[in-house]
Amino acid sequence: MGQLLLVRHGQASWDADDYDVLSPTGWEQGRVLGRALAARGLVPDRVVRGSMRRHRETAEAALGELPGAPEASVDPTWDEFDHVAVLDGMPEPPAEAPADKRGYQALLETALESWMDPEHAGRYAEPFAAFNARVDDVLRRTSDDGAPGTTVVVTSGGVIARVTATLLADGDPEVATRLWRKLNVVCVNSGLTRLVVGRRGTTLVTFNDHAHLDGHPELTTYR
């Protein structure tokens, strides 16, 4: 039996020129997670990350606190959906971008509704159904490839929400979509989702564990 630990990246820089860069808070979230895993005596047998900069920097921050951890391999199939393309694909985009996180989040959620609508699939290079298929495929491949031991995957909230929704929905695509809506907005930066891979397949054990941030309220962020 093996386990997959899915790590959401640390906080990115939503209001900077390049979103795909960890903020100082994001770097610290990664380091705190690494120290927490080290305190548990966990040394991963394999580390995989998406190809985005925020994935790489989160892996660097966490693995720097985990003596003996292997170097991360890169699999872009673990990348997040393209939020810029999702925003650009809105039927009626706003004239100006929101100036604060709350306004940005509200705009993104509206854009996601359009992205998730099959009637609008032609607006996007990767429609919602294609994103789901990609995530389902990489979970299947990573689970099949996993030997007994621990694989750490550094990825993004939308991906983790899809994995979790799929496992909870038990094959019902409509249920999976409804769950994804709810789970995607509550993923904590550096949160940990644990899957067990065994004879019964891949099973969800914990979702979005962020106990390593207890005592650090300034580090508990969602965007």
Image (cartoon, helix red, strand yellow):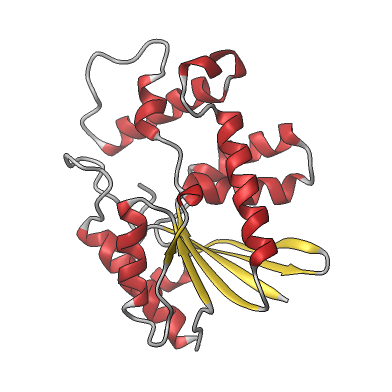
Q: Where residue 99 sits: x, y (%)?
A: 20, 30
At 73% from the left and 34% from the top, the residue drawn is 173
**Quadrant in which the N terminus is drawn:** bottom right
State the count of labels. 0
When the figure is inspected, residue 122 is found, relative to residue 193, above or below; the finding is above
When the figure is inspected, residue 138 is found, relative to residue 61, above or below; the finding is above
At 34% from the left and 15% from the top, the residue drawn is 93
Would residue 105 appear left or right of 45 to someone viewing this image?
Answer: left
At 58% from the left and 42% from the top, the residue drawn is 134
Q: Where residue 191 sits: x, y (%)?
A: 46, 61
- Residue at far left of view: 17
Would residue 150 appear left or right of 70 to someone viewing this image?
Answer: right
Would residue 77 appear left or right of 102 to someone viewing this image?
Answer: right
When the figure is inspected, residue 48 is found, relative to residue 119, above or below; the finding is below
Q: Where residue 203 sits: x, y (%)?
A: 73, 62
The residue lying toward the viewer, choosing from 223 and 3, is: 3
- Residue at far right of view: 200
When the figure is inspected, residue 26 is found, relative to residue 183, above or below; the finding is below
